[in-house]
Image: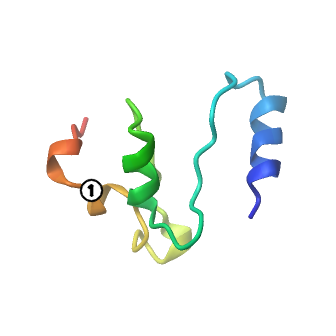
């Protein structure tokens, strides 16, 4: 995992301090998101990982989504 490297990048680019959520022990992306319950989720099209097969939003319950 590259979590510590990611945290360093966020710090070096002056992002606000806060938790960094990531998959652990076989979790799916949607499980991490549902546990974190963010106000905003920004997700790219994940083209680099099989064209969105592992995207979070399509896996979520519809009542959790407000798509802009």
Judge by depth and name the residue closer to the eye, 58 or 52.
58
Judge by depth and name the residue closer to the eye, 35 or 56.
35
Q: Residue furthest bottom?
A: 50
Q: Quadrant of residue 9?
A: top right
Residue 19 vertical position relative to residue 63 in the rendered view, above or below = above
Q: Quadrant of residue 65?
A: top left
Q: Which quarter of the rendering shows the N terminus?
A: bottom right
Residue 27 vertical position relative to residue 65 in the rendered view, above or below = below
The residue under the point 27% across, 56% down is 60
The residue under the point 74% across, 53% down is 3
Judge by depth and name the residue closer to the eye, 10 or 32.
32
Locate residue 19 relative to residue 2 in the image: left or right.
Answer: left
Query: Residue 5: image x %, image y %?
Result: 82, 50
Classify mark 1: residues with Cα within 10 Å, few (<14), some (14-19) or many (20+). Answer: some
Locate residue 63 relative to residue 38 in the image: left or right.
Answer: left
The residue under the point 43% across, 70% down is 54
Q: Quadrant of residue 19?
A: top right
Q: Residue furthest left?
A: 63
Residue 3 seen in this snapshot:
yes
Residue 45 seen in this snapshot:
no
Q: Which residue is mark 1?
A: 60
Locate residue 41 relative to residue 8 in the image: left or right.
Answer: left
Query: Residue 30: image x %, image y %?
Result: 38, 58
Q: Which quarter of the rendering shows the C terminus?
A: top left
Query: Residue 56: image x %, image y %?
Result: 38, 58
Residue 6 vertical position relative to residue 28 in the rendered view, above or below = above
SS class of the residue under badge 1? loop
Number of dots carrying numbers: 1
């Amino acid at each position: 995992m590259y979590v510590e490297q990611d945290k360093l990048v966020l710090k070096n680019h002056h992002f606000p301090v806060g938790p960094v959520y990531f998959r652990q022990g076989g979790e799916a992306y949607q499980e991490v998101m549902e546990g974190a319950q963010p106000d905003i989720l920004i997700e790219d099209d994940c083209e680099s990982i099989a064209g969105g097969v592992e995207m979070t939003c399509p896996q979520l319950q519809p009542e959790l989504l407000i798509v802009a």
